[in-house]
Image: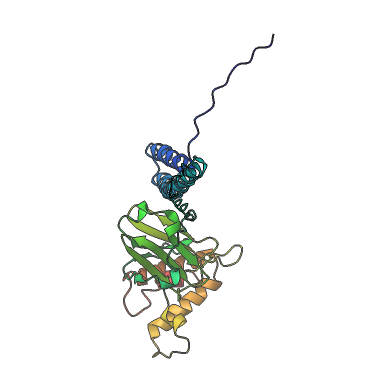
Amino acid sequence: MVSFEEIPETEAFPPSQERLLDAIEIEQAASKLTRPTARMHLEGLAKKLRKESDALKRVETSRRSASEAETTATAASNSPTVTATPPVPAAAAPVLAPAAPAPVFTTASSSKRTFVSIDRFSFDAGGYDAPFVTVYVGLPSVGSMARDLITCDFSASSFDLIVKDLNGKSYRLYKDNLEKDIDPAKSKILVKADKIILKLAKVKQGDYGGFDYWSELTDKKRSAPGSKKKADPQSSIMDLMKEMYDSGDDKMKKVIGETMMKQQQGGLDKKFGKDDLGDLEDSF
């Protein structure tokens, strides 16, 4: 005789309850994570599941009400009626309203979003042969945001940083006249607890050359082509040094790069002299 073992069926939950249970379990798992960004991603997923649970619950309630009304109407039509003299006219059957459609969640168009311009940030040009220049943007609590709300588009001569819905405001830092060209593919954005760090990748000069030297983040001449300025002897010397840097060997690049950095930091006199460029002359 063959015996059969009865396997108990698992308890089935409606879709809204399934979403809610998933959200609760994800929140419990997120609370045990140590990495803020990983916890932020899980909390965002849990929040989305809770919204879906609320929407499904409303649909289930509407369908359940319609089903109960239909059952009541069917029972009333099937029950025997007792006629009397004079006959009582039968009540009209209730008209069932169609079930409410599932709600559609929409977001405001990005073209209508108002941005607060970011005008305070720090710039680090790095060493004479550093592969990156760095921009530091302070934004309190930015590290707690969902990562998809923070974007930065890089091009050869620009970057466009956008932060959406941070404490009820959206922020933007846009620069389209960088002093030197950058490599968009190697540039990157880092999000910390209270700041954003932009790493702008310098363009390497040939297979064995060094990187361009930056003296500032932007160059006004790039944004206003054709503008004429009064000749500046110091600027002419700087242009000559930059040309020598671009065409020189590694030793020449090092000497010129250090001299240009000293000039930027105020380590040299405003007017260049023979003593100021002694190291440069020794390199010839």
- Measured as percent of width and height from the top left, residue 148 is found at 45, 57
- The residue positioned 45% from the left and 59% from the top of the image is 105
- The residue positioned 41% from the left and 82% from the top of the image is 235
Which one is in front, 63 or 264? 63
Which one is in front, 169 or 95? 95
- Measured as percent of width and height from the top left, residue 187 is found at 50, 61
The residue sitting at the right extreme is 1
Q: Quadrant of residue 216?
A: bottom left
Which one is in front, 117 or 100? 100
Is residue 217 visible in the rendered image? The answer is: no
Q: How is the image coloured?
A: rainbow
Is residue 74 visible in the rendered image? The answer is: yes
Q: Quadrant of residue 1?
A: top right
- Measured as percent of width and height from the top left, residue 29 is found at 41, 37
Residue 73 vs 32, above or below: the answer is below
Residue 129 vs 243, above or below: the answer is above
- Measured as percent of width and height from the top left, residue 189 is found at 45, 58
